[in-house]
Amino acid sequence: MTQKDLSNKQDQPQELATVKRDISAQVLAKVDAFQRTGELRLPKDYSPENALKSAYIILSDPKNNLLAKCTKESVATALLKMVTWGLSPLKGQCYFIPYGDKLECTPDYSGNITLAKRYGGLKTIKANAIFEGDEFEFEVGMDGRRKVIKHKQTLGSIDSPVVGAYAVYELEDGTTDTEVMSIDMIRKAWGQGATKGNSPAHKNFADQMAQKTVINRACKLLIRSSSDAVLMGADSDTETEAPNRYTKEVEQEANQGDIIDIPTEEVTSEPLADEPAQADSPEPMANSQELTADTEVPF
C-alpha cells in the first residue's frame, strides 16, 4: 500500500463524519422548513434528532457501511422520509434497504401499526396464525365485515403447518373488523419480498411471519383510507423483511461529490413504499407499538 493510499484510508472516517453532519443538518433544515410552512406536524413525543442519531448508528455499521456505499442524495431522502413518517429505526419501525447504490426507508409491520394508529383511527390490533387441525370459522356480515365465530387450538395443532392467519382490529370509534388470509395468499405476499419466503425466519417462524403479513394488510388499508391519505404505493401485501439486518448487497459505490439539496418533489410526490423487500426478522413477533389526525404528510 502506498503512502497516498494509506493517507486516503486514514481520511475516510473523517470524511464520513463530515458527510453525516452535512446530511443530518440538511434533513433537519428541511423538516424545520416543512414545519414552519405548516406542511408537517410531527408527533409531540417524536424526536427527529434521536431518530437521526439511531439511523446513523445503523448506516455507519462497518458490516454494511451503507453510509459510504449509497449515494448521499438517496441517504438524505431516506432519512427525510423516516422523520416525515415519524418512525424510529431503533424501535424496528422502519428499515434501511439498499437497492444498488440507492437507499430506501421501508416501514416494518410495527411501523404500519404506528401509522395506522396515527392516521387510520386504529385502537388495537391482534393477529393469530391458523394451524392445520385448528377449528376455525368466520362469517361475513351484511355490512361486509368479517367476524371470527370460532377458533379452537390445541398443543398438538400449534405444531402443525400454518394454513392461514387473521388479524382482529378495533378502531377508536368502536368499529371492529377482521382481516383473514389463507396460506396461499400469504405465500404470494412473501413472494414479493427479497427472499421469496425462503428465509430462515419464514421457515422457522412461519406462524409469526404470517401474523406480520396479515397485520401489514389490515394496517395499510386503514392508512390508505385515512383522511390524511398517506399513500402506500403498490397495492400488495408484501411481507416486509428486516435485513439481517441488511443482507442485500450494494451494487456500486456511492457518489463522492458534494451533497446536493434534497429535492422536495422526491418527498412530496412519492407514495409511501409498500415494503418492497422487508428482510427476515428471526426473532419472535414483538408486541405492537406506533402523524396525528391533523398531520399533513407532504408526499
Image (tube, rainbow, N blue to C red):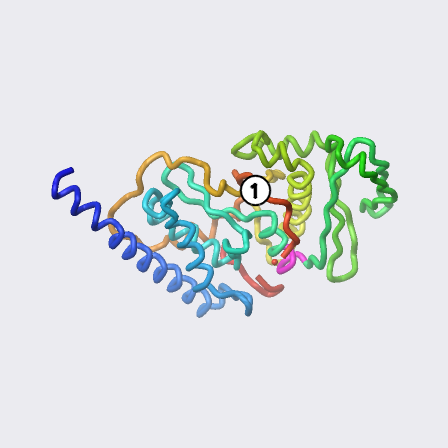
Q: Residue at x 77, y 37 (%)?
A: 158
Rate crowding at label 1 as few (under 14), some (14 to 19) or many (20 or more) other CA atoms within 10 Å: many
Residue occupying the far front of the picture: 155
- The image shows residue 114, relative to residue 71, as above or below, that is below
Q: Is residue 265 magenta?
A: no
Residue at the spot x=43%, y=64% of the render? 49
Which residue is more in the foreground, 23 or 31? 23
Specify the quadrant of the image occupied by residue 261: bottom left
Query: In percent of the image, x 49 and y 68: which residue is there?
Result: 38
Give how far across and how far down residue 17 sits, in percent: 29, 56
Depth check: give the residue in front, 235 or 23.
23
Per the rendered image, the range of residues in magenta is 116-120
Q: Position of residue 288 (x, y in %)?
A: 65, 54
**57 w.r.t. 99: above or below:** below
Q: Secondary structure at mark 1?
A: loop
- The amino acid marked with disc number 1 is Ser
Q: Is residue 117 magenta?
A: yes
Quarter placement of the N terminus:
top left
Pinpoint residue 29: horizontal percent, then vertical percent. 37, 64
- Residue in the image at 35% along x and 43% along y: 70
In this rendering, would 271 be left or right of 131?
left
Q: Nearer the viewer, residue 135 or 296?
A: 135
198, 77: nearer the viewer? 198
In the rendered structure, the answer to whether residue 136 lies left or right of residue 251 reads: right
Q: Which residue is mark 1?
A: 281
Q: Is residue 30 above or below residue 132?
A: below
